[in-house]
Image: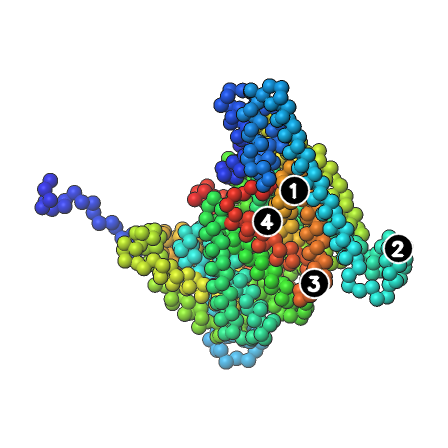
Amino acid sequence: MTDKTIKTDEADQADKADGAGQAAETGGADARPAPPPYSVCPAPGDAAAPTTPGGPATDPTRAEPDATGPARAELLGRLRRTYRARSRRVTLTAVVLGLLLAGLLVASVLLGGLRRIEPGDVLPAALGLRDGVADYTIHRIRVPRALAALLAGALFGLSGALYQRVVRNPLATPDIVGISAGASAGATTVLVLLPALPLGTPLAAVAGAFLLVGAIHALSWRGGVDTYRLVLVGIGLSAVCSAYTNYLFTLAEEHTLAAMMRWTIGSVNGADWAGVTTLAWGLAVCGAGTALLSRRLDCLALGDEFATGLGTPVGLTRTTALLLGAAGAALATSVVGPVGFVSLISGPIAVRLAGPSRAVALAVPVGAVIVLGADVLAQHAPLVSPVPTGVLTALLGAPYFVWLLLRRRQEATP
Amino acid sequence: MSDSSPPVSAPPPPVRTGFSRGTAVSVLAVAALAAVVVASVGLGARDIAPLEIVRILAHPGGSGYETHVLWAERIPRTLLGLAVGAALGGSGMIMQGLTMNPLADPGVLGIEQGASMFVVLGIVCFGITGVRGYFWLALVGAAVTAVLVHLIGLRATTGSSTIGLVLAGVAVAAVMSSLITLLVVRDEAVYAHLRFWSVGQLTGRAGVLSQAVPFMAAGLLLALPLGRTLNLLGLGDDAARGLGVRVERARLAAAAVAVLLCAAATAAVGPVAFVGLVAAHCARLLTGADHRWSLPVSMACGAVLLLAADTAGRLVLDQGEVQVGIMTAAVGTPFFVWLARRRDLVRV
């Protein structure tokens, strides 16, 4: 892939690489070498963060030629303070999200009545140390369900934020461009046609997702990929995949309502420990991969040419990140189905909460909170419950999607 | 050259190619319609010999099982498919003409999902039965959704209104189908009964023919004279106003007819996406940009497409059949992707 691989919308690109772009321009005008990468890497964050509108990102480079001892020290001090403030905010957000997750986990396990279980038995039963009703209800049903919701949400959040960061379009997430639908189609194929295959569902889901990523890129390629064409092609392919999944269900001799719900809308209902294991492995692998890629992704955010100049293998990084994201979404889909709009909204919410500098990492707990919270609501909320989890995430996420469409500036992408 | 000289150098009047081409296209359309009607009546899960079919058609009063299959199932189903396909084709063409959006389609823009949502709401909450009641609910739902999608699409900041409208449709359709699930999921019997509202199908809908056809016929008749208005509106608002069109009123009327057609089709068979999209583009390929020709041809294309998809859906499986909504998605989405690939589409 060349540096022209992904041509983003001009406004989008301008927004994304705001600070970096300005820094680069001033550098060019003064005929100085480009600023060192690590002073620039956090710059897009500076520009887009609501607390520091545009200022600090440009000032340093402008001031630099004249910056002698004290001015330089003051500048560095200011950068350090900004950095610390942002780190504090990220930490604080992470802690709050963690507490929220813990509360939701407890709620998910305890809600719904514990009539025949002693309160003292809940914790041992959750760890698998009791038998009978307590074991069945807590250890076999509620705990795996809660953990599956948490882990799947984390994976959806991670993959969505990764896609938004790499493709640089907030709408190009695995659920909108049909990667979840492709994974669902793959998983359903194995379920209906080859039910005996061991580990077939997750593998087929990943295969379907990779196939779809390839198809989307091949079909939206016209001497470069326009991100909106990519989104449109993805929407079309998503419809094909849903039609195929529906077709498979007409093929199946007997299809239960629960299976239909899971593979077309997405539902955590009926998740078991095997699924939790799959999700945990998926999260570990995708999280580690993203952590390894994160520095390169930071450079990629500066724009393809700049990143190439900094020695980043642009094509390789982008392909790896896209496949990693697709694998994450596919593994989550293979357990809970194509729960919609989670990967779309997690990244922008993380940006809103703590600024863009650690948005991909923060999208993980945000996604977990969304799916787990939606699942608690789907099970227990008055009027609506019980519904498939995907219904609630869609009802929450689609208005947010509309809001993403309507706002003037597209600043809030990870 | 003085002003009084005869205009010898004036170009000759344009040759009216529309007539011959229109005639050819009309013949083609009628032939295609006849072919799919024959296929739809003649083919199905139960093999009935062609001669037997002719005999049954000639003697409608018979009492055999095959007579029943033909007169009570296949023929009403074929007529319903014709009417629904024509309504969707017309609706798609009007929507594309009005919005200047090559991806406009009552299904893609979520309008059918909105109509379905209101129908399901009526069934579940108010116990409404019968296609007549469905139709009015679908009409309200389609109108509300169309206004919503239009407003969101107008204000979307996606660089091109084409994409903004499609994405608005995707979001609204997601909300509407989630609401449908929310309404029906708690009762498995209701869910099984209403499942065709989320995937359009013609199976077992023969009974609604007599109730649904008046609405669709009214819509189609109202749509036919719109070709000229659409042509004028296509010149841009100022030019149309200069030519004596009351632009706002004409737009509103055309949009109302499109919504009416879409609502009637949805009330009869549930949401069937991509028929309007494919039909409108096929019609434009066949007849060119003149809506006076392309609108009726689009209706014919829609009818052919829907019936062909329905007949194919009956034959794909050994047992049972594939719902027509799945078949049209399978046919229509490659078309959608092909359109989305067009270079001029993304940056309008």
Query: Is label 1 or label 4 in front?
Result: 1
SS for dot 3: loop
Q: Are marks 1 and 3 in contact (CB under 8 Å)?
A: no
| Residue labelled with disc 1 | A354
| Residue labelled with disc 2 | A124
Q: Position of residue A16 (x, y in %)?
A: 56, 37
Q: Is residue B281 above or below residue B216?
A: above
Residue type at the position of mark 4: Ile
Badge 2: residue crowd in 10 Å (few <14, some 14–19, many ≥20): some
- Circle on res. B321: none
Q: Considering only order in the chain, which callout, 2 or 1, is on the residue closer to the N terminus?
A: 2
Label 2: chain letter: A
SS for dot 2: helix
- Circle on res. A381: 3
Marks 4 and 3 share the same chain: yes
Q: Are marks 2 and 3 in contact (CB under 8 Å)?
A: no
* Mark 4 and mark 3: Cα distance apart in space: 27 Å
- Circle on res. A176: 4
Q: Is residue B207 above or below residue B182?
A: below
